[in-house]
Amino acid sequence: MKFRTRAIHVGNAPDPQTGAVVPPIHPATTFVQPGAGEWGTFDYSRSGNPTRAAVESTLASLEGGCGSLAFASGMAATHCATMLLNSGEHIVAGMDIYGGTYRLLHKICNRAGIEVTLVNLQNPQELTAAIRPNTKMVWLESIGNPRITVPDLPEIISIAKAHQLLVGVDNTFATPVLLRPLELGVDIVMHSATKYLGGHSDCLAGVLATADPELHKRLYFIQNATGAVLSPFDAFLLGRGLKTLDLRVRAQCATAQRLAEFLEGPPAVEYVLYPGLPSHPDHARATALFQGLHGAMITFALRGAADDAKRMVKSTKLFHLAVSLGAAESLIEHPATMSHASYDPAARQAAGITDNLIRLSVGLEDGDDLVADLEQALA
Ligand SMILES: *Cc1c(COP(=O)(O)O)cnc(C)c1O
C-alpha cells in the first residue's frame, strides 16, 4: 500500500467486537493474565498498551521501520536514544539542532559522563575530524533548525558507518512525507510528534523508529525501564493526526514556497532561508533528497535594528507568536530568545542564530491571507 493509505489503515483495523471503524481508546493500566507467570499480549501499560501499540505500528509503517516506540514527548524520545551510550562514550551532533536537544546533550547527558561535540555538518570533514575512539553516535536533524540547513545525509551516513557509529536523525521538520531516513541506512529516526505528525497543537508526543529488531529491543528496554511512554489518549490523537499527514504537509509545503518567494521581495528583508528557493545553499540537495518538496519552515533575517525582529513577531495577526510548529495554525517566533534561548550565547553565535532572525511555521490557512498578514506586519 502507498504512504497515504498506510497512514489511514495500518494500526486502524475496525474493532472486532463492535465493528467501529475507529478503534477504541484503552485507558486500562493493567490487563488480566492467563495465569501466574503467564503473560498475554499486554500486562501493564508502561510495558505496552493497545492504543499506543496501534499508533506505533502506523508510525513504523510510515518511516519504513520494523517497529517504533511512542513517548510522552520528543525530548523523552531523544533522551531514550542517548541512553544507549555508556558513561565515557561520545556523541557528535550537528550544530544546527533544536534548543532542547542542545540542552539535553550539554546539561543532562554530560552529567551522565557522555561527552558531546557539536560540529557544522554542512562540512562533513568536521564530522570526520571530531570522531574519537570513544565516539558511538552521530545525531543530526534532517532539516536543521533554525537556519533550515539540509545536511548531506548520504555522505554523513557513509562517514559514520565507516567508523561503526550509530546515526540518529531527528526527522521532525522533514516528516516521513519528505524523507524516510531509515531507507538511507540511518539507525534511529526520532520525531517530536508534537509537531507535524500530531499536526493540531493538541498532543505532546515523541517517536523513535528503527529498522533493526535488535536495536528496537534495546530501545524498548530503556523506554520500559525509564517509563516516559505516550498516554492512550495522546496515542489516539496522534493516530488521528497521522491520517491527514500527507495531505497537510503537501499543502503546507506549497504555501511555504509561495511565502518564501514573497519574502524575497521586500527591502526590509535581508535574506530568506527556505530550501525551495534557488538562493538557498542546499537547494539542489534538498530537491533531490525530498523528492521535490521543501518543507514548511521558513527563516528570514530583517535589516535594521535588532529590536525590529521582536517588533515584527508581535505585529502579525494570523501568525501566532509562539514556539512549536507543524500545526494547522501558522506560527511566528524569534529563535534567539525563544526556541534557541537554551543555547549558550557563544554557541548561538557560532550557529548563526542572530537577533534579526525570524522563524515561520506555515500552517493550513489560505496563502493569500498569510501573504497579506506578513505584508502588513513588515509595513
Ligand atoms: C519540538 C522539537 C523537539 C522536542 O520535542 P518535544 O515534543 O517538544 O519534547 C525536538 N526536535 C525538534 C526539531 C523539535 O522541533
Image: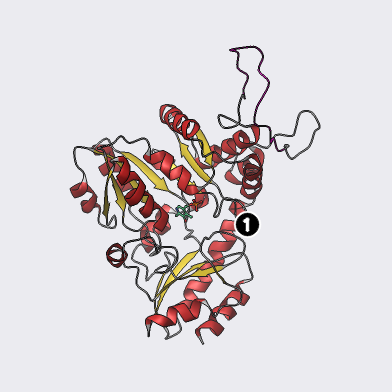
Instruction: Report the residue at 62% width, 35% height from top.
Output: 54
Could you say which is closer to the camera, residue 291 or residue 342?
342
Where residue 160 sits, quadrant-wise, is: top left
Which residue position is annotated with label 1?
A: 200
Screen quadrant of the N terminus: top right
Q: Which residue sits at x=21%, y=52%?
A: 125
Considering only vertical position in the picture, is 251 above or below 217?
below
Classify residue 88 as left or right of residue 365.
left
Please name the colour scheme applied to the rendered image.
Answer: secondary structure
The answer to whether residue 114 is left or right of residue 46 is left
Q: Assess mark 1: CB under 8 A from ligand 1?
A: no
At mark 1, the secondary structure is loop
Q: How many marks?
A: 1
Residue 52 in picture, x, y percent from top left: 61, 36
Q: Which residues are magenta?
A: 25-42
Residue 128, image x, y percentages? 21, 47
Query: How packed is label 1: few (under 14 Cα within 10 Å), some, or many (20 or more)?
Result: some
Q: Is residue 231 magenta?
A: no
Magenta span contains residue 37: yes
Residue 374: give x, y in percent of width and height.
54, 79
Between 36 and 206, which is closer to the camera in this rendering?
Answer: 36
Callout 1 amino acid = His
Query: Is any atom of residue 71 visible in this view?
Result: yes
Q: Position of residue 226 (x, y in %)?
A: 47, 35
* Quarter holding residue 282: bottom left
Residue at 48% of width from left, 74% of height from top?
261
Is 3 left or right of 351, judged from the image as shown? Answer: right
Is 214 drawn above or below residue 129 in the view shown? above
